[in-house]
Amino acid sequence: IRFLYGRPLDTLLATWGVGLILQQAARSIFGAPNVQVASPDWLSGGLRLAPTVFLPYKRLFIIALVALCIGGIYLYLYRSASGRRMRAVMQNRDMAACLGVGTRRVDALTFALGSGLAGIAGCALTLIGPIGPSLGTYYIVDAFMVVVLGGVGRLPGTIFAALLIGVFNTIFEFSSTATVGKVLIFVLVIAFLQWKPAGLVALRSR
């Protein structure tokens, strides 16, 4: 991947192609059927807040796990020297290199951190339903929209964008269908980016 740095479209296409290769390899090795993963007994049941409001323990655990990951990422990016180097490379790669930051090492660490978070997300999804080789393709478009809408490189914007897309997606799906809901979200994101291309929270340069 490092040979494609500075070429966003090529990087996107290359990683998409690698993902398809890994997906088909998993199909060939493990088979195509989805597999149901048994959750621990302490995650069974839930909280009933009202006659029509029921919160499963599985969902609450996922919310807590996401909050823990967000807190850990925030502390790492904003309170550690390694995180500050990562942000410096993201904001101005050439200047960071001139100041002695090892950009290749930061790139490798960023890739490893992102892969680890993707693995945690995959484990969380096993609590929601069956899993299979094509599970990630159902969420990749939403993930891209969250990053673009929130503002590239801005953690608060990403969190807010994820909440907005999740809430409006649920509202649209409830009032129409899942397909129509996705289309409406996509149209709204495009319209917003036409008005504010940098996203909800833009990077400030000095």
Image (tube, rainbow, N blue to C red):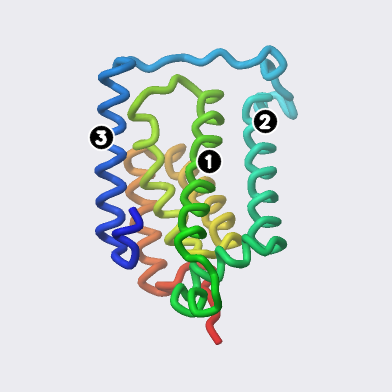
Depth order, front residue of 68/24? 24
Mark 2 or mark 3: which comes first in sequence? Answer: 3
Q: How far is the residue under mark 3 from the one under mark 1?
A: 20 Å
Q: How far is the residue under mark 2 from the one under mark 3?
A: 32 Å
Q: Residues within 10 Å of mark 2 (few under 14, many from 20)?
A: some
SS label for mark 2: helix
SS label for mark 1: helix
**Given this view, does label 1 or label 2 mark the residue nearer the observer?**
1
Q: Looking at the rendering, which quadrant does residue 124 occupy?
A: top right
Q: Circle 2 sits on which residue?
A: 61
Q: Give the residue type at disc 1.
A: Gly
Q: Give the residue type at disc 3.
A: Ile
Depth order, front residue of 193/62? 62
Relative vertical location of residue 48 with respect to residue 120 in this rendering, above or below:
above
Mark 3 or mark 1: which comes first in sequence? Answer: 3
Residue drawn where x is 38% and y is 30% of the image: 135
SS label for mark 3: helix
Depth order, front residue of 66/95? 95
Estimate the x, y position of residue 186 in percent, counting from the top left: 35, 54
Residue drawn where x is 30% and y is 30% of the image: 23
Q: Circle 1 sits on which residue?
A: 116
Could you say which disc has been placed on residue 77 in the image?
Answer: none
Q: Give the residue type at disc 2.
A: Phe
